[in-house]
Image (cartoon, coloured by chain):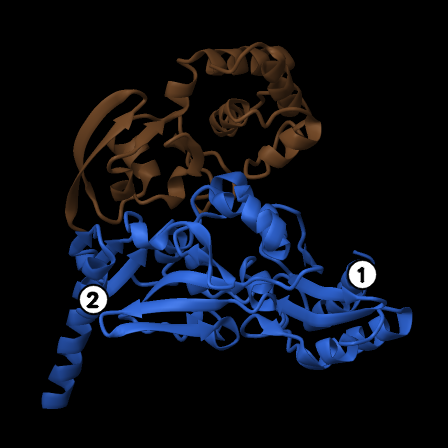
Amino acid sequence: MSVNCDIAFTLNGVPRRLAVPADMSTLELLRDQLGLTGTKYGCGEGECGACTVLVDGASVNACLMFAVDCDGRELVTVEGVVAGATGQRLRDAFVASGAVQCGFCTPGFMVQASHLLGQGRAGGEAEIRRGIEGNLCRCTGYRKIIDAIATAAQGGDHG
Amino acid sequence: MRCATGRWRRRVAEVAAVLDGIARYVVPRTLDEALGVLAAGGVSILAGGTDLMPQARAGRVRLQPVLINIRRLPELTGIERAGGGIRIGALVTITALRDSALVRERLHLLWQACDHFASDQIRNVATVGGNLCNASPAGDTLIPLLALGASAVLAATGGTRRVPLGEFFTGPGRSCRRPEELLVAVEVPEPPAGFAGVFCKHGTRPALDISTISLAVGARRDGTVLRDVRIACGAVAPTPIRALQAEAVVEGRAADAATIAAAAQAALADIHPISDVRASDWYRREMVRNLLQRALSHVGQL
């Protein structure tokens, strides 16, 4: 067992303070300790993007991040993303475009897409394709996901 | 009997160390504090964690009793011009390198490698220092930095030393960094005016995949001939390597078809590829031969 460390961070806008083992991943913290199961465990080594979360505004693989490193940072998970205007627009666009099949990769795509929209990096198909390189989908062939992100990008300011 | 007991005790201590996991987690606020922790020994260094976490989980790296998080050290940040070169702090992320106008304009070879590095999620976290210390023969930033003649700046309580990257890597996953040393920065000499370069890598998909081979080719156009020719190759030897024989073929010559073909042939004597899950040694040689010709012809026209 590794030593427990006290950390304080903001999770989906709410300040949190808790103790985590030093070798725990942020993904384990979110799913197992905090019960936020929207963030998915896919590969556990940064290849699939199913565990994508925002840390201080940048998209990150939660499986590759030590939970102790969350100390002092601002985390947003898919649960936080869909609570905002950009997330709701993305969710509507994913539904309208049929961008969801089995759904396992969807939270990771939603978080990464919100990051791209927030940075103004969803200006066209080529840019969107580059932006989602770190997310794997084994059902859709990506076409409808790209359509959904493009639709959401056209749908107003990205607040 | 005594000897067997000693072996048994050592084995118990080893097993206990694994079961005990991380005994202490430290987040130093100054470089001096960090170097003091490292000097005591038994430390794993955490920066971005994108290599440390999966390697520890897979058992390829054993976490030491002390985990030191160096992310809060201001001395390891920033990209700036310093003394005829560009100093890149070890904690600079790949995204920060990619977003830097200085890197894009003056170290375009490195910029290209950062643009092709893994995925957005990993670029946002992975650091140039971590990429260097991980010392993968296929590490994406290592190849252009080697071609650009960069040096690693290593600090310890006893002082700081600079090691050219050509001497820094000692094997797959190994460097000459001593356990008590911390990589604080990488220093890149500013390329001469007119220096242009091409980085290319080959894998089964453009993103995330570890390179089957990678190449960084740079040179300065002087009239019709190429000078200051630099060729570095990844994933074709136990460490990233310079293709010195190929460089010598091109140096001071025009990049015509005969020179390019001769250089690609010479490069085959510079590299020592192995067969592994990603490709056979034969395939790697053919890819070096072909991609080097393409890159040289491109550099000749830049």
Foreground label between 2 and 1? 1
Mark 1 chain: B
Q: Amino acid at mark 2?
A: Val
Query: Which residue: 69% across, 64% down?
Result: B218
Residue B260 drawn above or below residue A139: below
Residue B209 visible? The answer is no
Element on which disc 1 rests: helix
Q: Which is nearer the eye, B232 or B86?
A: B86
Who comes first in sequence, dot 2 or dot 1? 2
Alpha carbon distance from label 2 to label 1: 52 Å
Mark 2 chain: B
Q: Which is nearer the eye, B188 or B134?
A: B188
For mark 1, what is the residue?
B294
Q: Which is nearer the eye, B256 or B276?
A: B256
Q: Position of residue B78 (x, y in %)?
A: 41, 49
* Residue reaching furthest to the left: B2
* Chain letter for the part of the structure drawn in blue: B
Residue B158 drawn above or below residue B208: below
Res B41 → quadrant: bottom left
Colour of chain A in the rendered structure image: brown
